[in-house]
Structures are given as C-alpha cells and as structure tokens.
Amino acid sequence: MLALRFSNSTLQLVGVDVPAPAGEALVRVTLSGICNTDLEIVRGYAGFEGTIGHEFVGVVESSPDETQIGRRVVGEINAGCGKCNLCASGDSRHCASRTVLGIVGRDGAHAEFLRLPAVNLLPVPDEVPDEHAVFVEPLAAALGITERVAVTGNTTLAVIGDGKLGLLCAQALAARGASVTLIGKHENKLQIAARRGIDVLEVDRATKLNHEFDVVVEASGSELGFALAVQLLRPRGVLVLKSTFHGKTPIDASRLVVDEITVVGSRCGRFAPALELLARDLVDVDSLISEEYPLNAGISAMQRAAEKGVLKVLLRP
Amino acid sequence: MLALRFSNSTLQLVGVDVPAPAGEALVRVTLSGICNTDLEIVRGYAGFEGTIGHEFVGVVESSPDETQIGRRVVGEINAGCGKCNLCASGDSRHCASRTVLGIVGRDGAHAEFLRLPAVNLLPVPDEVPDEHAVFVEPLAAALGITERVAVTGNTTLAVIGDGKLGLLCAQALAARGASVTLIGKHENKLQIAARRGIDVLEVDRATKLNHEFDVVVEASGSELGFALAVQLLRPRGVLVLKSTFHGKTPIDASRLVVDEITVVGSRCGRFAPALELLARDLVDVDSLISEEYPLNAGISAMQRAAEKGVLKVLLRP
C-alpha cells in the first residue's frame, strides 16, 4: 500500500505492506487531514519516524470486535497499555507506555490502511459526511479545553490565532456557551468565525487592550501570541496552550507571577462530544478546507499545507 | 531620615524627610530584610524608583487607628485603591491601581520610617521576636501557594531551589501536611530543611527522575529549574512559579501541552497564617539569617546579599 513516511530526516511516499492487525482493528482510510503537528514532525518535533498523520475517517476491514467490520469510523489516537491505572480508568491519553497514531511509536493515517485498537474506534453518524468527520480529532482537541478549564456563559474568552486550530477552538468554545472573541490577522479567516456569530478582532487592535479576558487560548504557536495572551488576561486569568511546536519559546515568567496567571497545557480531547457537534452542524468545517489532494501527491500536499494562509489540506488514498 | 533608594539606575543611601502620614500609619522600622526582588529592582526589574525594601517589622508612631500606636507590627505590602471590586472584597493584591511597598509607586522599608494604610498593619504576637517577624512577608508568599493549588497530605510535592525562598516554601508546605522534597545544590542549605524532617535531594540526582511529583514549586529562578520542574511532574501536574526575575525564560511549551501541565504563578500571600506558623515555631527562620548590617551599611549589605550562598541579610536602622 502507499504511505507517506518520515524517516532519516526525509519525507517520502513509499510502498509498504498493509499492516498486520496483530489483535487490533484494520481500517481502510477514506480521507485524512494534514495537521500542523505533521509539519512539525517533518521539522524534527517528537523525534517520530514512520507513517505520519493522525486525522482520518475510514472503514473497518477487520476487527476483533466483529460488529465494527464494514462500519465507517474515526479513531482516538492514543493507544494505552491497557493495564495501568490511567488505562483502567478509561483514559489512555497520559498512559506512560502509550503509542500515538502517527506521532509516537505507531504508524499513522496518511496511508491506504492503518491499525488501531478496536476500543479506539467510534462509528460516524450517517449525517456526518467524511469531509466533516475527518475534523473530529482537532475538534475534540478544541473541546478538550473544557476538560481543563471551566467555561460557562459568564466566561469572557479570547482565542489568539485564526488558523484552523484557532477557528475550531473559537467555534467549539462558543458552542459551549462562552463569550468568545477570535483574534487574528486574516480578514477572510476571521469572517469564517464571524459568520457563526463570534466576535472577531484584528490583532493590531487587540494589542491595545489589557486585562480584558478571563481565559485566553493561544492557538497561534508564536512567541508574540503568548505575550499577547498574557497581556489580555485579567489577574488570575487562565492561558490555555494548544499549539505543539518545535523548539523553545521565551516567556516573561515574572508577568505570570505578578498577575498570578495560570497556564494550562491542553492536548487531546474525547471524540464523542466532537462527533455530536458535527452531527448537529454546530461548527463550520467546510470553510476550513483549503484543498484536497490524492495521497499519491502527498509530498506536494504537505508543501501546500505549510504555505501561509492555507487552512486544512486533505488527502484521499 | 536615612533611606536606601534606587533612582537614575543608582542605588544610594540618602537623607530624606520622614514621610508625611497623609491619612496612613507611620511606622518606625525596627528591622528589614533584603529580598531577591530588591536585587532585581536594582537590575531594572519593574522599573521602580524610590526607597526599596518590603520585608519589615516596626513600631507604629502614628495612625488614624489610634489603637495601633506603639504596637509592634508587620504590614501587607499591597495598598489598593479601596474602591474597586477587588478592594471591596478585602483583597487588594490585584487592584489595578495598587501601589506596592518598595516595588510599585510607594517608598519601601529599607529606611528609618515608612508609611502604609492602617488596614495593612497586623500586630506581631509577643512570642515572635523581631528577627522572626521580619520573615512574615516571604513566609506568607510561600503559604500563598496553597491559595492557588490544593495541597493535602496526599500531595507529593517538590520544591526546586534551596535559597531562602525555596527553604521557606518547603517548610511552609510541609507545615500544611504535604509530602515535600527539597531539591538543591548546597548540602548546608538542604540540611536546614532536613533538620525539620523534610526530604532533600541533590539536584544531580533529581535530574535522573521523571514524572514523580503532583506539584513542583520552581523557586530557583533559573531556566534549568523550570525545565527540571517540567521533567519531574507527572502528566497533568502543577508547576508553581514563585520567582520574579528580570528578562525572559525560554521554555519548551510543547512539553506543557503534551503532558498537559498547569503552570501557576503565585506572588503574595496573606500575613495572618504566616504569623501563626511563626508564633507556633513551625518554621526555622533563624537558620536563614546570614548576616545583619546597620542601615547605614545598606550598600554593602545589598552587595553581600547578591553573593552566591548567602541567605537572608537583615538591615537595622
């Protein structure tokens, strides 16, 4: 089968064997999405080697759970040991021995087939097309913020960054009832949120504000975004870090101390509530799709995804 | 009167007028303590100009509250506007218009006299000598951690840094029932904590550990301390930032995201519980005193306080 693989510091499209299920489910990938994390992996983040990609929708070819066979599914990306206290409690996201699809020790989704534990798979409701279902992983990550920070109708919340992650965070948190302002540089991207009733603000105007928000989500992945987030938070406010990026970010730690800011790292969320938002059409993901490439043009697709202004690039095997 | 002042980038001992009370209490300073923040101010932190110093014990000379006159007191360092919602709720520590003794817009404690709002002053119990009472501000700051993070008998907690702040944090949190490990480089300083029954660990051995603690307090003020704290925290653990220092610290933000670490800035605490710990002799502060200088040797005292290995330097007007 064809797979987009990163090894020896090189990204290549190669022919490899279809993975042996080895007690897990085998999924034929219908559509996969390129995430910034894929781009970071190719820059050396996480030291991963293998097939990249962790956003997908597909159809189950084989599974130890026979009810899954032939079903259209998405899959949670963390596969735990199944034995530790965390896994036993049903949350393998922080299992110390976990593998992560296309990120840690497990081949990923930019391929014709992938394998995952059967327990990781969730059926996709009929009303959710593949082109929406492929967004479930990043949307779940956006909703995961609410597992880490209380967000209510009284929460004044800003999201910094109008890329695909920021647009998903803004929409997901607005769907949870927060009063959300999306801050970004691109009028056309801000309009995607504005059409859904979200307040939007150009970053140049945001830099004139101080102490305005209870919660600020940093989804720009930039040092300036972090500094702006600190500036915009009221004392004892909460800064949510969503971006994973390679390298170190210089921060003014004394501002965190003086204003007693809380910084909360947030990674993966649960898929079920994200699927529900998609099924109820509460989030516009259509506007986030920039382009679709066939998997055999995966190298070009990755280059395209890395260009400024491009939102989600999809791959179809 | 004599005052140790920083202005035009210069630290000087100068003769100035005794402050006019202007509706506040006038306190004759008996003893003051040099904090790292004083050293940072002289390096340009916070842009403060005026009399430095915020740790003190003294005697009330005059006050709008006549019951205070002649009393031995300590004083909370944040003076709020008295009108905003925060001040009205009794907590001026984040009042946007606050002044802070010897740090923001208000002359400080390394002088013969200072003034503070009467409401900021607390009487010192008779059983607490001046040499202990002068530690109430940094001890309150250490206890302030428990306002920001739940600390119970089940909390495994490490403090990084065996300077005076780290030693106070370790003792204060152990007094609150946490299982505390103090991590540092100096055998003689670690022994101060060990004598109080606190586990101690040389930093070279700590760097071999991973994911060991629920809460880590960074009290070393160094980039390496921050990185070690992240390494030592279990997933979803809490990193408490206590140090205020000038400049920027490079952090690996992606570790915060992947392990979903919470970073909590913590500044000032309330004085009453700190006075209680001192009155019950639950914290060894005697061992933290390196030297006492007369105020008229304040310049030398500041130089001494900045030397490696020195703990608290006191000034007596």
Image: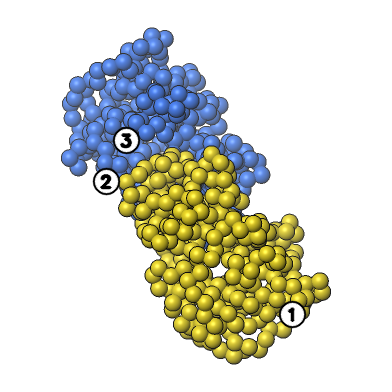
Chain colours: A yellow, B blue
SS at circle 1: strand
Q: The disc numbered 3 marks a residue on which chain?
A: B
Of residues B189 and B49, which is closer to you in this image?
B49
Q: Which mark is residue B43?
A: 2
Depth check, mark 2 against mark 1: the one in front is: 1
Measured from the top left, where is residue A96 in percent x and y?
64, 64
Of residues B212 and A292, which is closer to you in this image?
A292
- Residue occupied by mark 1: A61
Are the residues flagged by discs 3 and 2 from a single subunit?
Answer: yes
Depth check, mark 1 against mark 3: the one in front is: 1
Q: The disc numbered 2 marks a residue on which chain?
A: B
Measured from the top left, where is residue A165 in percent x and y?
50, 61
Q: Residue at x 43, y 57 (%)?
A: A191
Specify the quadrant that holds the C terminus of chain A: bottom right
Q: Residue at x 32, y 35 (%)?
A: B103
SS at circle 2: loop
As measured in the structure, the alpha-carbon distance from the residue carrying label 1 to the one carrying label 3 is 67 Å
In the displayed structure, does residue A71 sit left or right of residue B116?
A: right
- Residue occupied by mark 3: B103
What amino acid is found at the position of numbered circle 3 in the picture? Answer: Ile
User: Image height check: is A150 above or below A109?
Assistant: above
User: Image height check: is B250 above or below A16?
Assistant: above
Q: Residues within 10 Å of mark 1 (few under 14, many from 20)?
A: some
SS at circle 3: loop
Is residue B249 visible in the rendered image? The answer is no
Q: The disc numbered 1 marks a residue on which chain?
A: A
Q: Which mark is residue B82?
A: none
Q: Quadrant of residue B63?
A: top left
Measured from the top left, where is residue B75 in percent x and y?
40, 25
Of residues B75 and A200, which is closer to you in this image?
A200
Whichever of labels 3 and 2 marks the residue nearer the N terminus, that label is 2
